[in-house]
Amino acid sequence: MAQFSYKARRRSGEVIQGVLDVADRSAALVQIERLGLFPVAVDAAKGSVVVSTAPKGSRTEAFAAMLPPALRQVLLSKRKPKLQELATYTQQMANLLQAGMPLTVALNSMVHLESKGIPSEVSKGLRQDVMEGRSLSDSMAKQPHIFSDLYVNMVKAGEQSGALVEVLRRMATHFERFAEVKNKVTSAAIYPLMVCGVGVALVLFFIYFMLPNFMGLFSGFSIELPLPTKILIFVGNVFTNYWWVLLLTGVGILIAFQRFQSGEYGKRRLDEWKMRIPAVGKVIKLNYYGQFARTLSTLLENGVPVLTALKITEQVMPNRVIKEAISKTRDAVTDGKTLAQPLAQSKVFPQLMVDLVKIGEETGDVPAALKNVADTYESELNTALRVTMTLIEPILIILMAVGVGLLLLSVLMPMFKLISNIGGSMGH
């Protein structure tokens, strides 16, 4: 037997401490949970000898340790779960804890539940760490490819407040909302990309397979080809005879673009340009505004300190212009300013957001104000997506029609001229 000192929290939130005489950490955790407590920390008392129950490394990890660093990274690389997959996993965990299961038992059940995108080894690792006395948030922090800083900090806030189940439910809702918005944006982009792809495929098919037959027909007659036909022949010759030049040019442009966007200046300029694209830029900005407000609201609502919440939100945002504005806001809040002041000074966030945040500060409920902001911009995003698609669809159809029309005109004009010449010759 060994002695373990523990710190645990009652359902009311009260923190208590004590010492248990048990065989190992696992037994200590089981005893703590039987007492109706949530374990926060379990450590071996001074002078006690404890046999480690840490799991041995997997065969994959053992094999990877013998490989060069580059190959090891490829072998051990893991796919990040999608937002909907993370939402489902979080909701399942909340349901098990809500049913009254102790944390270790719930994590053991999570190992056997079907969680698409999240391997069972994740839950196994969490359960093992918790049984050894670590908190759930610390265990999750060891798996950053699955659990982001946002996730870990919200779980930590839930543990400290004794409202872990409620926090998990809010997180599941948070990820579901983000997944829904992302799916809408992705769906809206599919149609234009498909139309453009079909258009390019038709043009290339015509140039490589149809144009040579027509040119063979026209070369047998001495007629002056019209300008559109000459342009089409020139383009066809370039694609047929100088394709390697086009390929090298494309590769060169791609390399130059990659080098440009690999630097901090290039990344920021690209993020600026995205927000200024006509019609599409508005959709992008509305998406960013909603994402910022929703993330910050969720963190603050679950008890994460405002400076920590701003830092995590900054890390989550994909746009560097928004990141810089949040960083300056965090510095200003550190110096004692309110949240609304630096948001307004950044000139990045719209006045409506600033006004609503200011009202939230005056009423003492900033999370609710930010949630209202997120709802507002997500609703505007849906409208903007519909309007943008309404504009893009006819524009793409017109461009396709013009392109096909020019191709047909380039072929038909010399044919009409040829028929006219043949008719004139037969008349003579």
Image (spheres, rainbow, N blue to C red):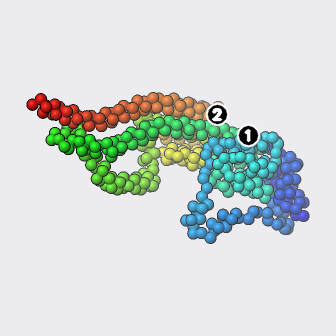
Residue in the foreground of this view, choosing between 320 and 392 = 392
Q: Amino acid at mark 1?
A: Glu
Q: Which structural element holds mark 1?
A: helix
Query: Residue at left 29%, top 35%?
Result: 408
Closer to the eye: label 2 or 1: 1
Residue in the foreground of this view, choosing between 156 and 108 = 108
Label 2: which residue?
368
| Residue neighbourhood size for the residue with mark 2, other residues' Cα within 10 Å, grouped as few (<14), some (14–19), many (≥20) | some
Mark seen at residue 94: none
Query: Residue at left 58%, top 34%?
Result: 374
Q: Which structural element holds mark 2?
A: helix
In the image, is residue 138 above or below residue 302?
Answer: below
Label 1: which residue?
166
Residue in the foreground of this view, choosing between 265 and 407 = 407
Q: Is residue 146 left or right of residue 5?
A: left
Q: Amino acid at mark 2?
A: Ala
Which sits earlier in the primary sequence, circle 2 or circle 1? Answer: 1
Marks 2 and 1 sit apart, C-alpha to C-alpha, by: 16 Å
Give the image location of residue 136, x and y in percent. 73, 51
In the image, is residue 390 above or below residue 1?
Answer: above
Asked which quadrant contains residue 403, the reply is top left
Give the image location of residue 283, x and y in percent. 48, 35
Q: Is residue 318 left or right of residue 16?
A: left
